[in-house]
Amino acid sequence: MGRRLVPLTLDNLQDLPKRCRSCVFWELDPVSGEAAVKAGTSALEKEAWISAVLLDWGSCGRVVYVDEVPVGFVLYAPPAYVPRSSAFPTSPVSPDAVQLMTAFIMPGYQGQGLGRVMVQTVAKDLLRRGFKAIEAFGDARWKEPACLLPADHLLAVGFKTVRPHPLHPRLRLELRTTLSWKEDVEMALDRLLGAVQKEPALRPL
């Protein structure tokens, strides 16, 4: 099985699941995001966001390929590039951390170590760039696919709550801990990355 983890660019944006290519939940503030969806410009806004972040900050995601088939992705960036993050009651993200926006591994490819490799690749990238941690806004009452990661699944793979909230706690994972992860976290990662974006299509908060 040949597998590659490739930085996300405009060239491989089309390899994300169709509904994710034009999702601007994180990339725009709530008002602008709703306006883009209504105007049918969300796909263009997504491309513009990726282009701007790449030029200004650098790589903001990874796409996972198995035998040249795209099977998953992860998206992350400092909160300054993520307008939606300021809309959460538990913001802001810590200054030494990058925000984990969303991630996904296709059904049928879970349980093969891809989740662990993906997160470790992100950790190495961010450690080289001087960051110490990755933080995420969890959904404490997650019941169906959405743009937020389930809080209990984040806790299962080593995140710790740094600001509690009944709906949207902010959680943190120290990046160095991910480099020593072993196979015992794979099942938890399967639950986390496999639960994020399944059918039906993503819906806003």
Image (tube, rainbow, N blue to C red):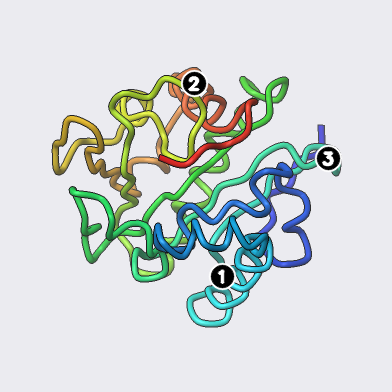
Helix, strand, or loop for circle 1? helix
Q: Nearer the viewer, residue 139 or 152?
A: 139
Identify which amino acid the numbered label 3 is placed on: Val
- Give the quarter of the figure containing the C terminus: top left
Q: Residues within 10 Å of mark 2 (few under 14, many from 20)?
A: many
Q: Residues within 10 Å of mark 1 (few under 14, many from 20)?
A: some
Identify which amino acid the numbered label 2 is placed on: Arg
The structure residue drawn at horizontal position 23% and vertical position 32%, both measured from the top left corner, is 167
Identify which amino acid the numbered label 1 is placed on: Trp
Quadrant in the rendering for residue 178: top left
Q: Which residue is mark 1?
A: 49
User: In the rendering, at what x and y percent does residue 159 appear?
Assistant: 29, 36
Between marks 2 and 1 in the image, the one whose residue lies nearer the viewer: 1
Q: Which residue is mark 3?
A: 69
Q: Residue 191: give its label.
A: 2
Give the CA distance from mark 3 to mark 1: 25 Å
Q: Is residue 85 above or below residue 73?
A: below
User: In the rendering, at what x and y percent does residue 7 appear?
Assistant: 65, 60
User: In the rendering, at what x and y percent does residue 5 appear?
Assistant: 68, 50
The structure residue drawn at horizontal position 63% and vertical position 63%, both measured from the top left corner, is 39
Exactly how many numbered labels are in the figure? 3
Q: Is residue 68 above or below residue 152?
A: below
Q: Nearer the viewer, residue 100 or 18?
A: 18
Q: Residue 144: give its label.
A: none
Q: Is residue 139 left or right of residue 147?
A: left
Q: Is residue 128 left or right of residue 48?
A: left
Mark 2 / mark 1, whichever is N-terminal? 1
Q: Residues within 10 Å of mark 3 (few under 14, many from 20)?
A: few
Helix, strand, or loop for circle 2? helix
User: In the rendering, at what x and y percent does residue 101 appear?
Assistant: 44, 50
